[in-house]
Amino acid sequence: MKKILVKKWKVDAAVKKVIDGKLMAVTEKQEQSTITAVINILDRVWEKIPNGIENFRTYKRIAKSFEVAEKSGEILLEEGDYSKVCKLVEENIPAILGLQKEYSDAIEGFLSPEPEAKPEVKKK
């Protein structure tokens, strides 16, 4: 089981709005997170993800983990599920994103999760 802390940050994003009947570009703060960073990368390479019911179920589990993590602040993934996502992220992350500190930190945190503490077993 892999446990990844969800990092969150705000970015300025250009959005189109109708103001006084005119279409205008304005800047708004939008929240980003480790989850959105990973999903943005996966969205770029969806055609590389193999089809089939087993992969469908795998990505359904991953989506459920992300959904729970939005509230808990921790992504919990089984080793196999984590390996699939991790490989796609490692192979497909746009290098230019290394220039964005928050994005870079979030992806590095995803790729190098903290080891889970194992419960202590008391010896008699």
Image: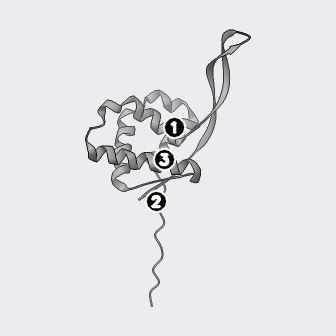
First reached walking from the N terminus: tag 2 or tag 3 = 3
Between the residue at mark 1 and the residue at mark 2, the CA separation in whole angstroms equals 23 Å
Residue beneath the point at 39% across and 38% down: 89
Residue beneath the point at 40% across and 35% down: 42
Nearest-to-viewer mark from 3 and 1: 3
* Front in this rendered view, residue 107 or 71: 71
Residue under label 3: 66
Residue type at mark 2: give it.
Pro
State the image coordinates of residue 35 (x, y, percent, origin top left): 51, 42
Quarter containing the N terminus: bottom left
State the image coordinates of residue 111 (x, y, percent, origin top left): 44, 46
Residue beneath the point at 48% across and 66% down: 117
* Front in this rendered view, residue 9 or 98: 9
Between the residue at mark 2 and the residue at mark 3, the CA separation in whole angstroms equals 19 Å
Nearest-to-viewer mark from 2 and 3: 3
Residue under label 1: 36
